Amino acid sequence: MSVVQEIKFKDEEKSMDVNDVLEVSFTILDQILDFTKELEEKTPSVFDHIHQNHCQSENKNTDSTSCSDISSSDSDSCCKFERFDIEDFIIYSYKAMKLSPNLLILAMMNLDKLLAKQFILTSENIHKCFFICMMEAQKYYEDVNWTNKDYSRMCGISTGELLELELEFLKYIDFNIYVKYEDYCKYVKKLKKTLKTNIMIRNTYIENE
């Protein structure tokens, strides 16, 4: 039984509302970026590399709307999703991928694994990093029909770069995607504690059905 399956059968104290998960995730990401933005050295990684087949910002003849839609079917024309606020990007990705709050938490755990390997998260690579963390959580824990081309359209980068980023991520974490249920519960407990100890404005990012 997978972590996600176990969560469904365990008591509800181990789960969190999606808006609370998003709220605490944004707070943690902001804290990480505040800590790393002053660092002079960055971890060499393909996460900081923009492929040449993407739209070029210096090309003045490029249609100004070509990079404005991260859900464009032409993934090679919208690589500049870093223009979007990371919160908006995560909310968009959460909806597009049809994730559950549990998978969003597992994505945060994936990110922690990456950071544990001395990876430096920056405003330039955070969009790619978090999308890969969400994608890997969904691929591993849910039986979904999304193809790499589907994910490419969701995040706005080419399938070639997506595969490169996925491999880079897996190498960083030693291909260890699995999360024990006990570790998940401990992580949720920490997230809930962060919610209680930090003064936050409770936003409704996702409308309750």
Image (cartoon, helix red, strand yellow):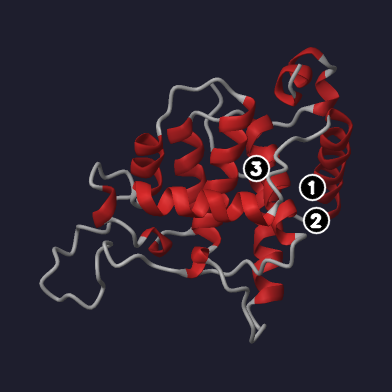
10 on left or right of 80: right
Query: Rounded to the nearest whole Å, what is the CA distance between mark 2 and mark 3?
Result: 21 Å
Query: Rounded to the nearest whole Å, what is the CA distance between mark 3 and mark 1?
Result: 18 Å
In this rendering, which labeled residue sits more in front, label 2 or label 3? Answer: 3
Residue 195 image label: 1
- The mark nearer the N terminus, 2 or 3, is 3
The answer to which image quadrant residue 63 occupies is bottom left
Number of disc labels: 3
Q: Amino acid at mark 3?
A: Ala
Q: Secondary structure at mark 1?
A: helix
The residue singled out by tag 3 in the image is: 107
Residues at marks 2 and 1 touching, judged by CB atoms closer than 8 Å: yes
Residue 198 image label: 2
Q: Amino acid at mark 1?
A: Leu
- The mark nearer the N terminus, 3 or 1, is 3
Q: Secondary structure at mark 3?
A: helix
**Crowding at mark 2 (Cα within 10 Å: few <14, some 14-19, many 20+):** few
Residue 10 x, y percent position in the rendering:
83, 16
Query: Rounded to the nearest whole Å, what is the CA distance between mark 2 and mark 1?
Result: 6 Å
In this rendering, which labeled residue sits more in front, label 3 or label 1? Answer: 3
Which quadrant: the N terminus?
top right
Camera-nearest residue between 90 and 74: 74
Q: Secondary structure at mark 2?
A: loop
Q: Is residue 171 above or below residue 92?
A: below
Tell me which residue sits at (28%, 62%) in the image.
Answer: 54
Residue 94 x, y percent position in the rendering:
51, 37
Residue 11 image label: none
**Crowding at mark 1 (Cα within 10 Å: few <14, some 14-19, many 20+):** some
